[in-house]
């Protein structure tokens, strides 16, 4: 038996958003999300059937073009494929559970996802490393990738280096879906790791987001 104290697992980063993984099994994934007043989870596609339950506070939940204001004591069920999002329009923190139940007959990620349309891709254009910091930057990327790889939905993270006298690096990050990427993006791990890289580069990095449409691999 495993008893989880939800209060102790609340997460709010300096950006006013946070996600804690409470359960991660093949057919059951549970996340607790925290949103400070005025913060939101952007609209994205549910990649599995989802049940949402508010733990404390009140928020506006959207799904399939409809919106509902919801507090504790109610459940919201969202079908796979629906567009969903959350906004905290109140003056108090909002904490809610996201319970995903991937269908048992869905194919295993490792067997097909590298060629599956819909894979979420984040292309990061890093600012150039500061003089003398290139090796430290590469070590940071290696170590941070090991941490990110532990997050559900992670597929790969690849560092691209400059050629022909260039100075900029880029990274290609693949995730099962935008939803699993956002779980990682709002985590304490991501916040801490990107604070570590800031002193190593000359300026801000620029992210670009895509989804896989077609893939050919020999």
Image: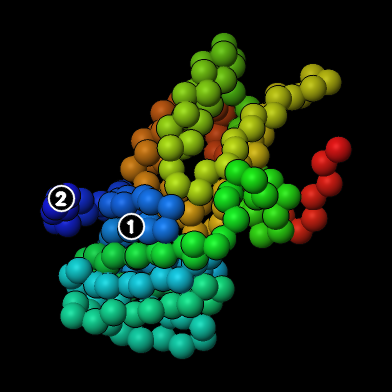
Q: Is residue 94 left or right of residue 182?
A: left
Q: Does residue 85 sit above or below 33 in this rendering?
A: below
Residue ranking furthest to the front: 105
> Could you tell me residue 199's position as x and y percent?
45, 26
Res. 52 in view: yes
**In this rendering, which labeled residue sits more in front, label 1 or label 2?**
2
Residue at 84% of width from left, 46% of height from top? 216
Q: Which mark is residue 31?
A: 1
Q: Nearer the viewer, residue 66 or 200?
A: 66
Q: Is there a contact, CB below 8 Å, between mark 1 and mark 2?
A: no
Depth check, front residue: 93 or 10: 10
Residue 134 drawn at (x, y percent): 59, 16
Q: Which residue is mark 2?
A: 1
SS of the residue under disc 1: strand
Name which residue lies at 17% across and 49% down: 2
Q: CA distance from mark 1 to mark 2?
A: 19 Å
Is 143 left, or right, of 29 in this rendering?
right
Q: Quadrant of the C terminus?
A: top right
Q: Residue at x 48, y 36 (%)?
A: 149
x then y, percent, for residue 93: 22, 66
């Amino acid at each position: 038996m495993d008893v989880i104290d939800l209060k102790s697992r609340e997460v709010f980063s300096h950006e006013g958003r946070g996600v804690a993984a409470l359960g991660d099994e093949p057919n059951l994934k549970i996340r607790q999300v925290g949103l400070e007043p005025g913060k939101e989870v952007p609209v994205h596609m549910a990649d599995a059937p989802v049940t949402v339950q508010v733990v404390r506070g009140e928020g506006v939940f959207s799904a399939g073009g409809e919106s509902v204001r919801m507090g504790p004591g109610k459940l919201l069920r969202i079908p796979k494929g629906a567009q969903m999002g959350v906004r905290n329009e109140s003056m108090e923190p909002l904490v809610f559970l996201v319970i995903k139940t991937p269908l048992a007959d869905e194919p295993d990620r490792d067997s097909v996802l590298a060629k599956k349309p819909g894979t979420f891709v984040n292309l990061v254009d890093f600012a150039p490393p500061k003089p003398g910091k290139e090796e430290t930057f590469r070590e940071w990327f290696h170590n941070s990738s090991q941490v990110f790889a532990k997050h559900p939905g992670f597929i790969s993270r690849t560092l691209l280096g400059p050629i022909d006298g260039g100075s900029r690096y880029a990274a290609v990050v693949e995730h099962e879906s935008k939803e699993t990427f956002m779980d990682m993006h709002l985590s304490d791990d991501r916040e801490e790791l990107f604070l570590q890289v800031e002193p190593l580069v000359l300026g801000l990095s620029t992210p670009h987001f895509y989804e896989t449409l077609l893939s050919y691999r020999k």
